[in-house]
Amino acid sequence: MTWLTVLLLLVVAAALVLRWRRPAWFWLTFGVAFAMVRLLVRYGTVMDACNLTVPASRWRLAVARWLKRETPRQRVPRILRIRPTRTGIRLRIKMQPGQDAFEFSAAADRLRHSFAVHQVTTREVKPGVVEVAMTGYDILKHVQMPTKVDRGQLRVPVALCEDGSVHYRDYRKGAHSLNLGATESGKSVYARQVVKELASQRVALVGIDCKGVELAPMARRFSALVDNPDDAAELLDALLVRMQVIYQIIRTEQRLSADIPDAEITADIWGLPEHLRPEPIVITVDEVAELALFANRAEEKRRDRIITALVRIAQLGRAAGMYLDIYGQRFGSELGSGITMLRAQLTDRTSHRVNDESSAKMAFGDISAHAVFATTQISKERPGTAVVGDSTGGWARIRTPHTSLRAAVNACNRHEDLTPDIPELARFRPRFAPMAPASVPMVKAPVKV
């Protein structure tokens, strides 16, 4: 056995160990090179086998008949760019005339097997160009968020998508969201991640936690927090009063006249000058069913009052800088009148593992049947895995990195000074004694006898 053979065996053994124990390292060292070679060698054959080619043009067919030559081969979509990434390969393809992006989306599973990659997703970049994202390994098995993420005002990273990109909760683009999930599905971890990321921003956090254990440990960063339906009704009424105050500020600042430039006319808080702009408010409602259930006539009146207030905030709150995050196990019409109206206002949808198909339809029934099916396939062995979608019909699988309650509490305590005081919500703000600095135990010097 020569030294070259020994070296080759060591390299193969190292590759196998990396693929088993460290799939991300294996991909960066060996996997990406193998995948690129496999892709370039098999590309034309795979496109033909997956019915992603088109016949030659009529002019070429006519010329071949005149010259009595063999029939031209099928035309293969042209590769515009191949870009390796830390999790896979991104391939931009110029479609042939007569093709559409849906054909590539329908063939995604066949492409996955043909190119021997873990996952394939497609999206249309522009007319005539489709991007095929190939994932080299199961990146949702052990979620590791990238070190560099694109944070911004009311834009926070919350999870990793199956194609290797980062999923953001962007309140400026999707003002209100609905998050469903069964017990132990990872819904609470998702909420912790959102609160943890928002804690460092200039934003007021408002919580309704009828269980009293999910948001209460992070209360130092909340401008208002209640733990029962009666206080929740009062809090929502106070938020409606706050909303009217903000609208009055906007109307006063507009002062519309012919000499005011168009750029200075605004209909929301983001067009106001910095010194006049109110703090945006993110309202987190945990277990919304506790607010919608009732047992007697008095509780029914309180329930109608709460749901009406939530609907009004969802319809009118965006311009006033109020954003809703609603969490629950189910969110269907069985919760009473007004629920479907509220759900229609919640643009962003997230569903963790659910116990039945009807729960998945509550989130994605009006968005995508494929998203409903993907939600029902989430395994209970992978808490934190979810399907996200919006009103445009797009959806993706994500998984939230494990965020311990201690990590979220530490972030909220560290940024306690950023908690704004809102006069309308002052009576709902949690009260705490000032946090004492960590004390160092004193060691007494030994007494000499």
Image: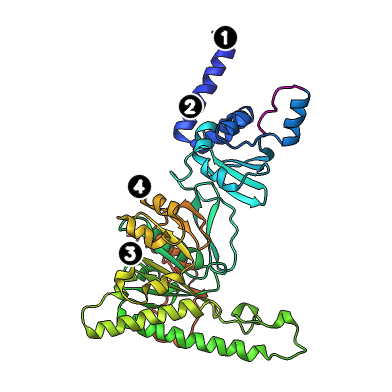
Q: Answer with left or right where residue 97 lies relative to residue 426.
A: right
Number of labels in the image equals 4
Choose top left, top right, bottom left or bottom right for residue 54: top right
Q: Which of marks 1 and 4 precedes in the sequence? A: 1
Which residue is tagged 3? 330
Q: Which kind of residue does numbered mark 3 sit on? A: Arg
In what element is the residue under mark 1? loop
Which residue is tagged 2? 16
Residue at mark 4 to residue at mark 3: CA–CA distance: 18 Å
Q: Answer with left or right where residue 380 lies relative to residue 414.
A: left
Span of residues in magenta? 68-75
Q: Which of marks 3 and 1 precedes in the sequence? A: 1
Residue at mark 2 to residue at mark 3: CA–CA distance: 44 Å
Characterize the local packing of mark 1: few (<14), some (14-19) or many (20 or more) Cα atoms within 10 angstroms: few
**Mark nearer the viewer, 2 or 3:** 3
**Which residue appears at 30% of the width and 83% of the height?**
302
In what element is the residue under mark 2? helix
Which residue is tagged 1? 2
Q: Which of marks 3 and 4 precedes in the sequence? A: 3
Which residue is tagged 4? 379
Question: Between residues 7 and 127, which one lies in front from this camera angle?
Answer: 127
Q: Position of residue 249 (x, y in %)?
A: 59, 89
Q: Are marks 2 and 3 in contact (CB under 8 Å)?
A: no
**Mark nearer the viewer, 4 or 1:** 4
Q: Which of marks 4 and 2 precedes in the sequence? A: 2
Question: Between residues 60 and 247, which one lies in front from this camera angle?
Answer: 60
**Which residue appears at 47% of the width and 76% of the height?**
314
**Which residue appears at 52% of the width and 89% of the height?**
245
Residue at mark 2 to residue at mark 1: CA–CA distance: 21 Å
